[in-house]
Image: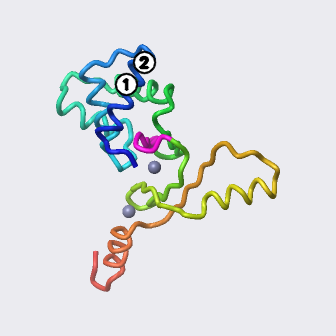
Amino acid sequence: LADPKDRLAHVLAKLRERGYRVTPQRRAILDAFVASEEHPTVEQIFRIVSGRFPNASIATVYKTVAALKEIHEVLELEFSQESNRYDARRPYPHPHVVCTGCGRVLDPELSHLPAIEDEITRRTGFRISSHRLDFYGLCPSCQEEDARGAEPGGP
Ligand SMILES: [Zn+2]
Ligand SMILES: [Zn+2]
């Protein structure tokens, strides 16, 4: 996994190469995206950036996401009920584990993924180019909360 600083430099260079203008505000947005391991939403990035740029607009965040998508430097995770989440640290398909309690999204390291792809190819004849693999459940801190809530006399 690339260092956030290297990742930012890479994304900035690629944007400039494609003729995108990188304003200080857009740079701050990119910085917030690559610095986050939390798979942030557009709204979360907007909140971070508007601390430094009080005149920032959420439209600029959306435009920056669109630019990142165009240069294939962000992975977009769409959810039907929740806001989209973004992974600008690993902009390629990878498995996720999603907490149904608090909405945390993590990147589990899975060692068997290439074997699964091979098996799918063997069984279906498909040449696999991408995948979407999400696991859902309760994260450790939500499990704790759950257990506390279940205690007699608890809230
Ligand atoms: Zn949770
Ligand atoms: Zn991820």
Residue 67 sits above or below residue 122 on the image: above
- Magenta region, mostly helix, strand or loop? loop
Q: Quadrant of residue 26?
A: top left
Could you tell me which secondary element the residue under label 2 belongs to? helix
Q: Amino acid at mark 2?
A: Glu
Residue 143 sits above or below residue 21 on the image: below
Residue shown at 75%/45% (left/top)? 127
Residue 121 position, x and y percent, is 76, 53
Residue 61 sits above or below residue 115 on the image: above
Residue 77 image label? none
Residue 153 position, x and y percent, is 27, 83
Outermost residue to the bottom? 152
Residue shown at 37%/36% (left/top)? 42
| Disc 1 target residue | 13
| Disc 2 target residue | 17
Q: Are marks 2 and 1 in contact (CB under 8 Å)?
A: yes
Q: What residue span does the magenta drawing correspond to?
A: 83-91
